[in-house]
C-alpha cells in the first residue's frame, strides 16, 4: 500500500499541497518519479537513494515508483527531497509512526543525508499556513527570516536522522543560535532627502500627494531640471513596509535570485531603458519575477521613459491597472504581485529643450510628435499626475524646504485616514471604483465642474475618475472629511499635457465655471 507524505509545491508565489506516494513492485531494480517532475526533481532519486543508504532501506530487486500528486502540476526544484525520503522510510518500515496529514516536509538532501535550504522556502512556508499545515519540517538556516509563524509549528532540522528521531519521539539536539530577523530592525532610510532639493515646490507637493494616495506620476522637462533628483528622493517620504509586505517582497526577491538590501524600506527599482520586456515584466521558461514585481509595495522609476521600446511600455498596462502580472508559458501560467507606484521621467522632445527658457529647441514638429507618440494613449491615461518641470535658480536658497521625515508623517496620517474610511489597508489610487464612489460624494456643482473640464481637456472616463481619486487624497492630507472644491481644483492642476503650459487659474469653482 502506497504511503503519502505531504510537501509544498510553488506556482509563482502561490503554493499548493503535493502528496508524495511511494510504491514498491517486483521487477528490475529501478526508481521512477512520475507526476510531471522537472529536471531537478528527476535527479532527486540519486540524492534520496544515497542519503538513505545508511538506514537499512532495502530496494534490491524491486521497482520503486514515486508519485507526486497532483499529476497535472509541473514540479520544479529540489523542494520535495525530504518528503520523498520520509515516504520511502515509511514504505520500508524503518519509520513506523503515523504522519498526520497536517504535517509537511520541505528541503533538499545531500548525498550524506544532510538537509539543505532551497530557493522558495519562505513562500512555501507562507503557503503552508494557507493550506492548513500545522507542522512543517524545514532546513535549518541561520539567515532564514522567519523563526516562528502563528498557527504553524516550525521544526528546523539539519539531517534525515533528526527527522526520524523527532517523529519517533526522541529529543532533538539544540541548533546554533539564529540571526535576528532583518525585518525586526528599525532600519534608517537610505537615500536623498527632500530638504536638499532647491525649489520645485509644486513638484514636491505633487509627489507628497502621490505618496499619500499611491498615484502614478509622469514628469517631463528639459535635461538637468531635477526630474531624476526628485524621483530618487521620493522613497524617503514613503511609509515603512508592514511585516506582511516585507515577507511578500522577500519571497519575490528570493524567487528572482535578486539581493534585497533593505527589508524595511519600500523598494526603488530603476531599470535602464535598454532593459528587455522580459526583465521588466518577468518571464523565462520557468517564469521569474520581473522589475514590476521586484518593485512591489514600492516604486518603479522609468527614467527617459520615451527611450523604452513601445512594446515594453504597452506591456505595463495590465500591471498598472490590476496590480499583478500574469505570465503565460507553454508549461503553465504564473501570477506575481505587482503593486507598485509608477514614477516616470522624460524629455519633451528628442533634443530635450522644447519649451525651455534657456535653450532653443532644434527639433521639427514631426520629430516632436514622433517622440511623444512613443508614450501611447493608454499608458498616459494611467498616469494620475503629469508634471511640467523647468530649471530653478540655484542661488534662490533653500531655507524653507521641509525634511522628508516631516512630509512622511503627513503621508502616514493620510494613509491611516484612507484605511479607516475603507475598512482595510487600501489607498485611494487602488480602491475599486464602486467602493470609491460609494465613499466619496461629490456635490452637483463639483460634478458639473469636473464634467466641463473633462470635455475641455478631452479626458477619458478613467482620467475623470483619477481626478476624483487625487482630490480625495488631497482632502485626506488637508484633514477634510468631505471632498472640498479646493482639493478638486488642486487635483486638476496636477495634470498638465505634454509640451503645454500649466493650466491658468481660471474657470474656478467659485467663479461659476
Image (spheres, rainbow, N blue to C red):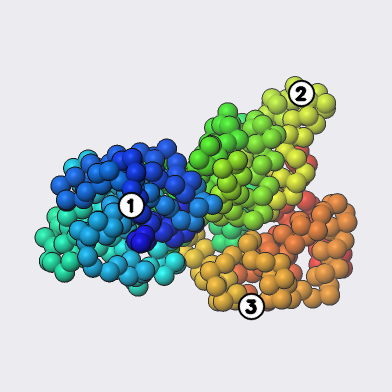
Q: Are marks 3 and 1 in contact (CB under 8 Å)?
A: no
Secondary element type, mark 1: strand
In this picture, residue 161 sits left or right of residue 33: left
Q: Residue at x 80, y 58 (%)?
A: 461
Is residue 342 left or right of 351 when viewed as pictured? left
Judged by depth in the image, the label closer to the viewer, 3 or 1, is: 1
Q: Secondary structure at mark 3?
A: loop
Q: How many marks?
A: 3
- The residue that label 1 is drawn on is 24
Q: Is residue 311 visible?
A: yes
Residue that label 2 marks: 363
Mark found first going from the N terminus, 2 or 3? 2
* Residue 419 falls in image quadrant: bottom right
Residue hosting label 3 = 481
- The answer to whether the residue labelled 2 contacts the one labelled 3, judged by CB atoms less than 8 Å apart, is no
Q: Is residue 262 above or below residue 280?
A: below
Residue 458 x/y as whole percent = 86, 51
How busy is the neighbourhood of tag 1: few (under 14 within 10 Å), some, or many (20 plus)?
Answer: some
Let me know if residue 124 appears in the view.
Answer: no
Whole-angstrom CA distance, mark 2 to mark 1, is 77 Å
- Callout 2: SS: loop
Residue at x-position 60% and y-position 41%: 329
Amino acid at each position: 500500500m502506497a504511503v503519502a507524505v505531504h510537501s509544498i509545491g510553488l506556482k509563482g508565489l502561490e503554493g499548493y499541497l503535493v502528496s508524495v506516494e511511494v510504491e514498491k513492485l517486483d521487477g528490475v531494480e529501478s526508481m521512477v518519479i512520475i507526476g510531471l517532475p522537472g529536471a531537478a526533481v528527476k535527479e532527486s532519486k540519486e540524492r534520496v537513494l544515497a542519503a538513505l543508504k545508511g538506514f537499512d532501506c532495502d530496494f534490491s530487486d524491486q521497482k520503486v515508483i514515486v508519485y507526486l500528486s497532483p499529476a497535472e502540476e509541473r514540479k520544479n526544484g529540489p523542494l520535495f527531497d525530504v518528503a520523498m525520503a520520509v515516504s520511502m522510510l515509511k514504505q520500508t518500515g524503518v519509520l513506523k509512526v503515523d504522519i498526520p496529514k497536517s504535517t509537511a516536509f520541505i528541503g533538499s538532501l545531500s548525498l550524506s543525508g544532510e538537509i539543505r535550504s532551497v530557493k522558495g522556502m519562505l513562500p512555501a512556508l507562507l503557503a503552508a499556513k494557507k493550506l492548513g499545515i500545522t507542522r512543517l519540517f524545514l532546513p535549518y538556516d541561520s539567515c532564514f527570516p522567519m523563526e516562528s509563524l502563528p498557527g504553524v509549528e516550525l521544526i528546523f532540522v539539519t539531517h534525515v536522522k533528526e527527522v526520524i528521531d523527532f517523529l519517533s519521539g526522541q529529543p532533538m539536539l539544540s541548533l546554533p543560535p539564529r540571526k535576528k530577523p532583518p525585518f525586526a530592525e528599525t532600519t534608517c532610510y537610505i537615500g536623498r532627502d527632500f530638504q536638499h532639493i532647491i525649489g520645485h515646490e509644486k513638484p514636491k507637493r505633487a509627489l507628497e500627494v502621490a505618496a499619500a494616495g499611491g498615484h502614478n506620476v509622469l514628469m517631463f522637462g528639459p535635461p538637468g531640471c531635477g526630474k531624476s533628483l526628485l524621483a530618487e528622493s521620493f522613497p524617503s517620504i514613503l511609509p515603512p513596509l508592514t511585516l506582511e509586505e516585507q515577507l511578500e517582497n522577500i519571497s519575490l526577491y528570493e524567487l528572482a535570485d535578486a539581493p534585497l538590501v533593505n527589508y524595511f524600506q519600500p523598494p526603488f527599482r530603476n531599470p535602464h531603458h535598454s532593459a528587455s520586456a522580459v526583465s521588466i515584466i518577468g518571464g523565462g521558461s520557468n517564469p521569474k519575477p520581473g522589475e514590476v514585481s521586484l518593485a512591489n509595495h514600492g516604486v518603479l522609476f522609468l527614467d527617459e521613459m520615451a527611450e523604452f521600446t513601445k512594446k515594453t511600455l504597452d506591456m505595463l498596462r495590465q500591471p498598472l491597472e490590476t496590480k499583478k502580472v500574469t505570465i503565460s508559458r507553454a508549461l503553465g501560467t504564473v501570477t506575481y504581485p505587482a503593486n507598485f507606484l509608477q514614477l516616470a521621467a522624460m524629455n519633451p522632445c528628442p533634443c530635450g529643450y522644447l519649451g525651455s527658457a534657456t535653450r532653443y529647441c532644434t527639433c521639427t514638429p514631426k520629430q516632436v510628435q514622433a517622440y511623444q507618440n512613443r508614450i501611447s494613449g493608454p499608458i498616459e491615461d494611467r498616469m494620475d499626475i503629469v508634471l511640467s518641470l523647468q530649471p530653478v535658480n540655484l542661488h534662490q536658497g533653500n531655507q524653507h524646504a521641509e525634511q522628508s521625515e516631516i512630509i512622511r508623517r503627513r503621508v502616514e496620517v493620510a494613509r491611516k485616514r484612507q484605511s479607516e474610511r475603507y475598512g482595510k489597508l487600501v489607498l485611494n489610487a487602488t480602491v475599486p471604483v464602486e467602493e470609491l464612489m460609494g465613499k466619496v460624494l461629490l456635490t452637483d456643482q463639483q460634478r458639473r465642474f469636473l464634467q466641463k473640464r473633462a470635455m475641455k481637456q478631452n479626458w477619458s472616463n478613467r482620467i475623470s475618475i483619477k481626478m476624483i481619486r487625487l482630490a480625495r487624497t488631497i482632502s485626506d492630507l488637508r484633514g477634510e472629511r468631505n471632498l472640498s472644491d479646493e482639493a478638486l481644483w488642486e487635483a486638476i492642476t496636477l495634470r498638465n499635457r505634454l509640451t503645454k503650459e500649466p493650466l491658468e487659474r481660471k474657470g474656478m469653482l467659485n467663479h461659476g465655471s
